[in-house]
Image (cartoon, rainbow, N blue to C red):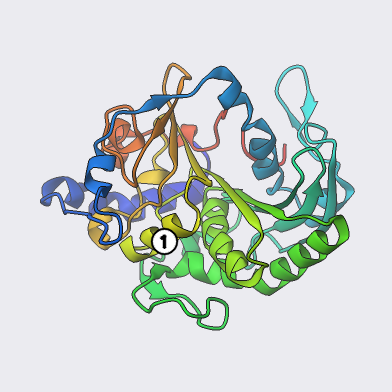
């Protein structure tokens, strides 16, 4: 188990997930992408060992987001695995620029630059079982429009989970300022946004926010782990159109979190799922909510078929969290 916080989330979802099984399957077509239905049914694509290994830097960056700001700014963080390997030391060419949050009302976040990846890195803290306030965030299942000041020009049809929306707004201005500083200081033109669990949801919304405010020449990469559904179909469509082929949404084995909030509540995943199988193989699942048996909703049709212990990993041997 990963703590009372996630258990609370799952109990809040139990009745709705059971209802999904009883309800007729909805037709989640994409008006701007007419082939989406066929994409949802497309067979999975196995990843090679080198492709799997290429995610390790981002996995460590997502894990480090669970560290307090002072730890991140010193780039001196926890130990993972046997023999011990420092998660910060796994990315030795990273230079921190800014970090913030209190781990409760504002999730931890950090911004820096990785010379090896030639990218600004933006990381957001995931679900923290030891804090009570984020429980309220995860249990707040409503769709709301994005703030027009932070997201100018977006249609009012585009909506996200309001708890995730509020969590992103809490640090949005500070994160954007830090990204601008990092891009200027290092001459960067690439931005990578990452996070685990709640941090993955914040990262998904933050990527949209940053793209609206950074130079049009900026290249983006989004890598999330154990991310819940973030918004409605209109949000997913918008995200997919702005980040084609640039999003990787990695789910581990029987993790329950990626199947909530339920689709019948109006939530839909963005594209980019990569599912880690029980034999530790990794497969790409084309489409938004791919129903193939090797993808997450094939593995975990409801919360009673899942395992909360898979939420923190391992992701290619790396578990989430500062230590």
Residue 251 place in picture, x, y as percent: 46, 37
Q: Considering depth in this image, is 228 or 82 the residue closer to the camera?
A: 228
Graded by Cα atoms within 10 Å as few (under 14), some (14 to 19) or many (20 or more), the crowding at tag 1 reads some
Residue 58, x across and y down, in percent = 65, 39
> In the image, what residue occupies the spot 28% across and 49% down?
14
Question: With 170 as the anchor, is 100 left or right in this view?
Answer: right
- Compared across the picture, whether 313 is left or right of 139 comes to right
- The quadrant in which the C terminus is found is top right
List x then y, in percent, for residue 38: 23, 41
Q: Is residue 269 above or below residue 206?
A: above
Q: In the image, 150: left or right of 141? A: right
Residue occupying image coordinates x 66% and y 41%: 63
**For residue 219, what is the image quadrant?**
bottom right
Q: Residue at x 42, y 21 (%)?
A: 278
Q: Quadrant of residue 106?
A: bottom right
Q: Which residue appears farthest toward the front when viewing the image? A: 217
User: Quadrant of residue 215 in the image?
Assistant: bottom right
Label count reads 1
């Amino acid at each position: 188990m990963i703590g009372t916080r996630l258990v609370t989330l799952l109990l809040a979802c139990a009745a709705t997930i059971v209802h999904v099984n009883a309800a007729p399957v909805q037709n989640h077509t994409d008006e701007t992408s007419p082939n989406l239905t066929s994409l949802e049914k497309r067979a999975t694509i196995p990843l090679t060992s080198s492709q799997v290994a290429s995610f390790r830097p981002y996995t460590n960056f997502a894990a480090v987001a669970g560290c307090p700001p002072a730890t991140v700014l010193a780039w001196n963080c926890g130990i993972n695995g046997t023999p011990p390997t420092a998660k910060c030391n796994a990315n030795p060419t990273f230079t921190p620029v800014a970090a913030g949050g209190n781990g409760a009302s504002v999730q931890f976040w950090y911004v820096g630059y990785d010379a090896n990846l030639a990218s600004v890195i933006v990381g957001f803290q995931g679900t923290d079982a030891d804090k009570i306030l984020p429980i309220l965030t995860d249990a707040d299942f409503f769709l709301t429009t994005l703030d027009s000041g932070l997201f100018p020009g977006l249609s009012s049809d585009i909506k996200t989970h309001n708890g995730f929306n509020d969590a992103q707004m809490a640090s949005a201005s500070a994160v954007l300022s830090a990204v601008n500083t990092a891009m200027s200081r290092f001459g960067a033109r690439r931005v990578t946004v990452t996070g685990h669990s709640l941090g993955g949801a914040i990262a998904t919304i933050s990527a949209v926010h940053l793209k609206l405010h950074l130079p049009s020449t900026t290249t983006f990469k989004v890598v999330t782990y154990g991310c819940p559904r973030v918004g409605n179909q209109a949000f997913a469509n918008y995200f997919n159109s702005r980040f084609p082929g640039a999003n990787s949404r990695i789910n581990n084995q029987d993790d329950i979190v990626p199947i909530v909030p339920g689709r019948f509540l109006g939530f839909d995943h963005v594209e980019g799922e990569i599912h880690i199988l029980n034999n530790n193989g990794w497969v790409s699942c084309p489409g938004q909510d791919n129903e193939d048996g090797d993808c997450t909703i094939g593995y975990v049709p409801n919360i009673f078929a899942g395992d909360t212990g898979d939420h923190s990993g391992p992701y290619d041997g790396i578990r989430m969290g500062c230590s």
